[in-house]
Amino acid sequence: MKLVPTLASLLLCTALPLLAHADNAARTCTEVSVDGYKAPDYGCLSQQMGGDTDATKAAKKNREAQQIPIEKRPPNAVGLATPAATGVRMGNTFGNSVKPQRP
């Protein structure tokens, strides 16, 4: 008598995970809504739009272009003072005094 409910529960426990992961091919994106603000899954949307090889090549070129060696970067990007920035800081005392007009 107890064998039938045990077998039924065992079958149900093994079938539920298979049903939960059944439709991976559909690739539906989930959209989360919190306090009325919607936040789509941009990673999923990009995958649905396709893996364009030209786009990946362009993204790689962009990343390489942004990785400029430190000796070729402009001084303000490295944190060094430029003559223009020093002139703004010193104000009308630039070249006349060691005390800046603005601290």
Image: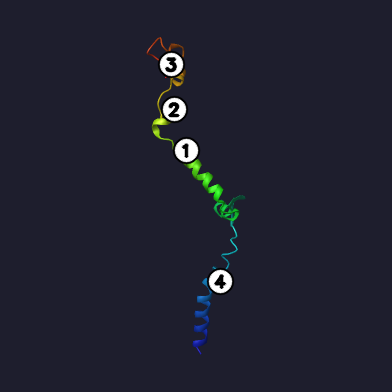
Within 10 Å of disc 3 (Cα), the crowding (few <14, some 14-19, many 20+) is some
Q: Position of residue 21 (x, y in %)?
A: 54, 68
Instruction: Look at discs 4 and 2 and give the one toward the viewer.
Output: 2
Mark 2 Cα shell of 10 Å, populated few (<14), some (14-19), many (≥20): few
- Relative to residue 79, is residue 49 drawn left or right? right
Verify CB contact (< 8 Å) between mark 1 and mark 3: no
Question: Circle 4 is placed at which residue position?
Answer: 19
Q: Earlier in the sequence, mark 4 or mark 3?
A: 4
Q: CA distance from mark 1 to mark 2?
A: 16 Å
Mark 1 residue type: Gln
Q: Is residue 50 above or below residue 96?
A: below
C-alpha distance separating marks 2 and 3: 17 Å
Can see residue 35? no
Foreground disc of the pair 2, 3: 2
Q: CA distance from mark 4 to mark 2?
A: 58 Å
Query: Camera-side residue: 80 or 36?
Result: 80
| Label 4 Cα crowd, 10 Å radius (few <14 / some 14-19 / many 20+) | few
Give, as a three-letter code, the residue at label 3.
Met
Mark 1 / mark 4, whichever is N-terminal: 4
Q: Earlier in the sequence, mark 2 or mark 3?
A: 2
Task: Residue 72: name its quadrant.
Answer: top left
Q: Is residue 98 left or right of residue 40?
A: left
In the image, 94 versus 34, the foreground residue is 94
User: Which mark, residue 90?
Assistant: 3
- Picture coordinates of residue 8, whole percent (x, y): 53, 82
As drawn, the label of residue 25 is none
Calculate the distance from the C-alpha at mark 1 to the C-alpha at mark 4.
46 Å
Q: Secondary structure at mark 1?
A: helix
Of mark 1 and mark 3, the one earlier in the sequence is: 1
Residue at the spot of label 2: 76
- Looking at the rendered structure, the secondary structure element under dot 4 is helix
